[in-house]
Structure formats: structure tokens, C-alpha cells
């Protein structure tokens, strides 16, 4: 009986730890459109007249050029939070 309780407690701990790690991961989004500009450290993508600019900092082997249709996969990352 004691062994079953210990095994159950360990299993519950593992499930809770896995759930906490999953919840902490940032959600990934995507944006598909046509490249309008590739700058130093940025890329601009037009989707139906709405142009979004993305930082390419940390991206390796960026081969997109103006006019290419691309899908950008991104995560929202907070740089700073000011309280009012």
C-alpha cells in the first residue's frame, strides 16, 4: 500500500511538472504575405495591404527577397513593461 502511494505521488508530480512546462511555452503564430522590404535586421511582409515588420535578429540563412511569398513564424516577446 505504501509503495502504491509513493508511485502515485511521483506520477502526479511528473504530470504537474509537464503541465507547468507546457503552459510556460510561448504560443507560436504565423503571417503569410509578400515581402515588401528586406532591411538590415528586419523584413516587411504585406498581406492584403496590411504591412507588418518583423525583426530577423537571430534568424539564420534568411534567403527571402522583395516580391517573394513567405510565411513568417513568430512568437510575441515582451521587451519591457511600464506600469501606470
Image: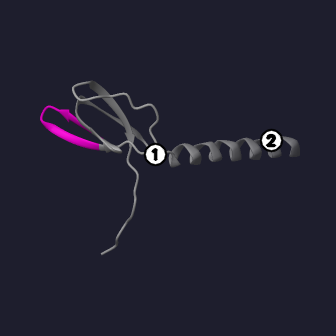
Residue occupying the point 39% across, 64% down: 80
56 lies left or right of 6: left
| Picture layout, residue 9 above or below residue 61 | below
Q: Position of residue 37 (x, y in %)?
A: 23, 37
The answer to if 84 sits in the magenta stretch is: no
Residue occupying the point 15% across, 39% down: 50
Q: Residues within 10 Å of mark 1 (few under 14, many from 20)?
A: few
- At mark 1, the secondary structure is loop
Q: Nearer the viewer, mark 2 or mark 1?
A: 1
Residue occupying the point 58% across, 48% down: 20
Q: Main secondary structure of the magenta part?
A: strand
Q: Which residue is mark 2?
A: 7
Give residue 84's mark.
none
Report if the CB atoms under discs 2 and 1 are less than 8 Å apart.
no
41 lies left or right of 21: left
| Residue stretch rendered in magenta on the structure | 43-53
Q: Residues within 10 Å of mark 2 (few under 14, many from 20)?
A: few
On the image, which quarter does residue 22 sit in? top right
Residue at the front extreme? 40
Q: Position of residue 34 (x, y in %)?
A: 22, 28
Q: Position of residue 2 (x, y in %)?
A: 87, 46
| Picture layout, residue 35 above or below residue 2 | above
In the image, 83 versus 48, the foreground residue is 48
Q: Could you tell me which quadrant the N terminus lies in?
A: top right
The answer to if 48 sits in the magenta stretch is: yes
Q: Earlier in the sequence, mark 2 or mark 1?
A: 2
In the image, 73 versus 37, the foreground residue is 37
Colouring scheme, one of rainbow, by chain, secondary structure, one colour = one colour
Q: Which residue is mark 1?
A: 26
- At mark 2, the secondary structure is helix
72 lies left or right of 22: left
Residue occupying the point 38% across, 39% down: 74
Amino acid at each position: 500500500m505504501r509503495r502504491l502511494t509513493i508511485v502515485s505521488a511521483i506520477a502526479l508530480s511528473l504530470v504537474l511538472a509537464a503541465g507547468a512546462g507546457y503552459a510556460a511555452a510561448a504560443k507560436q503564430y504565423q503571417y503569410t504575405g509578400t515581402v515588401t522590404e528586406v532591411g538590415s535586421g528586419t523584413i516587411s511582409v504585406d498581406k492584403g495591404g496590411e504591412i507588418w515588420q518583423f525583426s530577423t535578429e537571430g534568424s539564420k540563412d534568411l534567403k527571402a527577397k522583395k516580391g517573394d511569398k513567405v510565411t513568417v513564424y513568430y512568437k510575441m516577446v515582451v521587451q519591457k513593461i511600464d506600469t501606470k
